[in-house]
Amino acid sequence: MGIMKFGGRITKNLFSKPPTLNYPAEPREYTERTRGHVSFDNSDCILCNICGRKCPTKAIHADKTARTITIERMGCIQCGYCVDSCPKACLSMERNYTYPDSSKTVDVFNVPVKEKPKEETQ
């Protein structure tokens, strides 16, 4: 009886398409809800560190004195809490993944000093 089930499976697999993609020739297209990696846009960041406090693994840290945001890529679990909690929407989830590496990746982003608009005197 087990041989009959196994024979049917072999026949089915012989005449069906493979479930895998031809990876180098056909790059993978990720769906809209894919959580790949956190990206940072430093144009509006106010260095409030709310994202660092919401991160369950403490993979994000904002340093006000050095004016930097540090993201530990191997510590991030792509939960999206930092993206949801950012008041200025500086963080977003990209739909692609970071490339594998033999060393831990730490990204440091510099946040420029915002100049206050000068008031015109009459």
Image (spheres, helix red, strand yellow):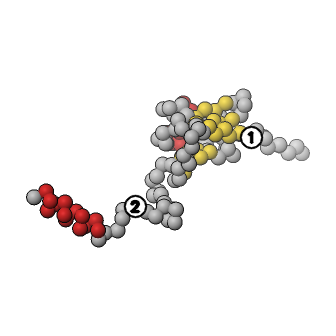
Q: Secondary structure at mark 1?
A: loop
Asked if residue 11 lies left or right of residue 118, the reply is: left
Residue located at (65% from left, 36% from top):
69
| Picture quadrant of residue 86 | top right
Counting the numbered discs, the total is: 2
| Whole-percent x, y for residue 92 in the image | 56, 47
> Where 88 sits versus 27, above or below?
above
In this orientation, which residue lies closer to the viewer: 83 or 38? Answer: 38
Q: Which residue is mark 2?
A: 20
- What's under tag 1, amino acid-wise? Pro
Residue depicted at x 58% and y 37%: 104
Residue 30 picture location, percent across and down: 47, 57
- The kind of residue tagged 2 is Thr
Which residue is situated farthest in the left direction here? 1
Occupied quadrant, residue 7 = bottom left
Residue 70 in sight in this render = yes
Which mark is on residue 112? 1
Residue at 79 percent of width and 43 percent of height? 117
Q: Earlier in the sequence, mark 2 or mark 1?
A: 2
Give 31 or 91, whichever is nearer the viewer.
31
Q: Tell me, yes or no, if residue 29 can be seen here.
A: no
Residue 48 % position (x, y): 62, 33
Q: Is residue 112 left or right of residue 13?
A: right
Identified at 54% across, 46% down, the residue is 100
Residue lying furthest top:
65
Q: Are dots 2 and 1 in contact, CB under 8 Å?
A: no
> Badge 2: few (under 14), some or many (20 or more) residues near its Cα, within 10 Å?
few
